[in-house]
Amino acid sequence: MGMAVLAGALTGCGSGGSPSASAAPPTATSAASRTGQPSPEDSSPSHGSKGSQGSLAGKVIVVDPGHNGGNAAHPEIINKKVDVYNGRKACNTTGTSTDDNYSEHAFTWDVATRLVKILRAKGAKVVLTRPNDTGVGPCVDERARIGNRAHADAVLAIHGDGAPAKGHGFHIIEPAPIKGHNESIIAPSRRLGGDMRDAFHQGTGIPYSTYLGKNGIDVRSDLGGLNVSTRPAVFIECGNMRNPGDAAKMKSPQGRQKMAEALANGFAKYLG
């Protein structure tokens, strides 16, 4: 998760209380369907696939892959300020990367598309906040509103962190209460966060973060994707992309598949 920056620069994602990367695209096109990627919204589960009548039948899930591939080329869009109720934040950010330039936006898109396939096979209706990894945004407040409009049963924003290299591990970010706005989602979001944490840890073997949070949980009031949400919502920082060990897992297709499967198990535990 990264702070708003000029085009071409990459910054850490989420560490040290930096702004969130959740927001609304200038346009949401049908490019995903043209390229064979999961569409932003699909109410039809994969009939006939294994588990198509699983525990998530009838549930609405919003998956928010952090950042976007076109963000760095459009600072005039992503640096604009949006209202997150307790302040104004940049529309979006470029995100971070591993030391050999595997980008956070590519990582989050890959994990998200793997996760979507699993969730739809279990019968869930899944909404993506962006249709591909080539666009810009959406802004952090709009990403939350996508979940609100969908009446989502649960919302997950997927990220990778850009902390100092000595730190490693994953953590869940839960919303802090913003008076008059998100108080109703605090308790269910904590349950969602706990279920996601347990499932991710069990399914991937990745330890809790050594540098942020407590027992794999952090609570923040500066993320638009949580402040603006009226649906149960959490973020996950799947690892520190600047740490060699975490980066190796995040660059591995097998590692990303394990992450997607673990996150699907977290949804099943919370919603089942």
Image (cartoon, rainbow, N blue to C red):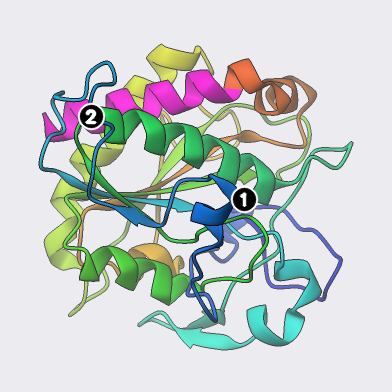
Magenta stretch, residue numbers: 256-272
Q: Is residue 44 left or right of residue 65?
A: left
Q: Nearer the viewer, residue 71 or 99?
A: 71
Q: Nearer the viewer, mark 1 or mark 2?
A: 2
Disc ID at residue 47: 2
Spatial CA distance of label 1 from label 2 is 40 Å
The image quadrant that residue 8 belongs to is bottom right
What's the residue type where badge 1 is placed? Ser
Res. 207 in view: no
For label 2, the crowd category at 10 Å Cα-Cα, with few meaning under 14, some 14 to 19 and many 20 or more, is few
Which of disc 2 and disc 1 is earlier in sequence?
A: 1
Q: Is residue 218 left or right of residue 95?
A: left
Q: Which residue is mark 1?
A: 15
Q: Residue at x 80, y 73 (%)?
A: 73
The image quadrant that residue 31 belongs to is bottom right
Q: Assign the N terminus to one quadrant of the image.
A: bottom right
Q: Residue at x 28, y 32 (%)?
A: 46
Q: Is residue 270 magenta?
A: yes
